[in-house]
């Protein structure tokens, strides 16, 4: 079964850092564009960042660029999100997603990892 | 960035009724549009990609239409499990953007 499992969320103080991980199983990530999407409590979906299959192309939401960095390790079948200088506005459930071939939609989603930024 | 606007915010219907959800883009996204369904406590699920193509395993009662700036998701006859929130997402230009969602709830 093709699965994505996020980890690394938790409670962090404003200004702190966190590194999220996403472990893929049942498929090899080297063929796919991967993404992070977040959802603040009770709110809608917000795209965070995407990385191409080889890692050559990276796109990050303008409001997060400079603080959030997406990366991948195809040998480990894993995706990462380094988050720095966190604020309360970053409190959300963070989903790891896989794009369809051709990037027409995200056909696999993890269950999410919750990041709470609070003093 | 491209702003995606969904309407209505809430759609109150009964099982067996037809649901029509709209998504409008602030500029053309051609056919690069996806629809997702999200139930409480669950991750979103891809329903439609490239505006009108059903994802693997999605029931035929779900259909997507449109191109350019105006798109529609239709559920031909609501099943009890279809009451959920639906999001559209454009993939024509970076940054990718989602609509704010339409909640389909029980009348």
Image (cartoon, rainbow, N blue to C red):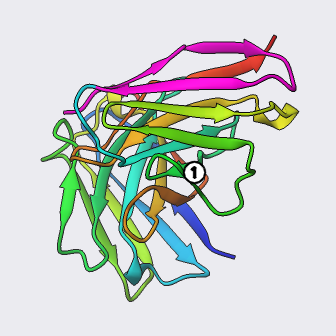
In the displayed structure, would residue A87 be above or below residue A47? above
Q: Nearer the viewer, residue B77 or A43?
A: B77
Segment colored magenta:
B1-25
The N terminus of chain B lies in which quarter of the figure?
A: top left
Q: Position of residue A115 (x, y in %)?
A: 46, 41
Count residues near mark 1 (Cα–Cα under 10 Å), then give few for <14, some for 14-19, many for 20+.
many
Q: Label 1, on which residue?
A: B46
Chain identifier of the residue bearing label 1 in the image: B
Measuring from the top left, give residue B26's x and y in whole percent: 25, 25
The residue sitting at 40% across, 74% down in the picture is A32
Q: Is residue B66 above or below residue A58?
A: above
Figure check: A16 above or below B21 = below
Give how far across and how far down residue B59 sits, in percent: 75, 51
Determine which quarter of the picture holds residue A76: bottom left
Q: Position of residue A70 (x, y in %)?
A: 27, 61
Residue B95 shown left or right of residue A36 in the figure: left
Does B51 sit left or right of B102 as displayed?
left
Is A109 positioned to the left or the right of A90 in the image? right
Disc 1 secondary structure class? strand
**In this orientation, which residue lies closer to the viewer: A52 or B51?**
B51
Residue drawn 41% across the image and 58% down it: A104
């Amino acid at each position: 079964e093709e699965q994505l499992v996020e980890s690394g969320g938790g409670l962090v103080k404003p200004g702190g850092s966190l590194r999220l991980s996403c472990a893929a199983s049942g498929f090899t990530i080297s063929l796919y564009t991967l993404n992070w999407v977040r959802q603040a409590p009770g709110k809608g979906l917000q795209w965070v960042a995407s990385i191409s299959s080889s890692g050559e192309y990276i796109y990050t939401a303008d409001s997060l660029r400079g603080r959030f960095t997406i990366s991948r390790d195809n040998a480990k079948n894993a995706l990462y999100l380094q988050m720095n200088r966190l604020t309360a506005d970053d409190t959300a459930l963070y989903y790891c997603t896989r794009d369809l071939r051709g990037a027409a939609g995200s056909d696999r989603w993890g269950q999410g990892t919750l990041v709470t930024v609070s003093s | 960035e491209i702003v995606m606007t969904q309407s209505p915010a809430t759609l109150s219907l009964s099982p067996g009724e037809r649901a029509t959800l709209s998504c409008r883009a602030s500029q053309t996204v051609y056919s690069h549009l996806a629809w997702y369904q999200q139930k409480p406590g669950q991750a979103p699920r891809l329903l439609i990609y490239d505006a009108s193509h059903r994802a693997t395993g999605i029931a035929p009662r779900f259909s997507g239409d449109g191109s350019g700036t105006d798109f529609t998701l239709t559920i031909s006859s609501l099943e009890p499990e279809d009451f959920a929130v639906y999001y559209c997402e454009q993939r024509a230009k970076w940054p990718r953007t989602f609509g704010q969602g339409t909640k389909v709830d029980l009348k």
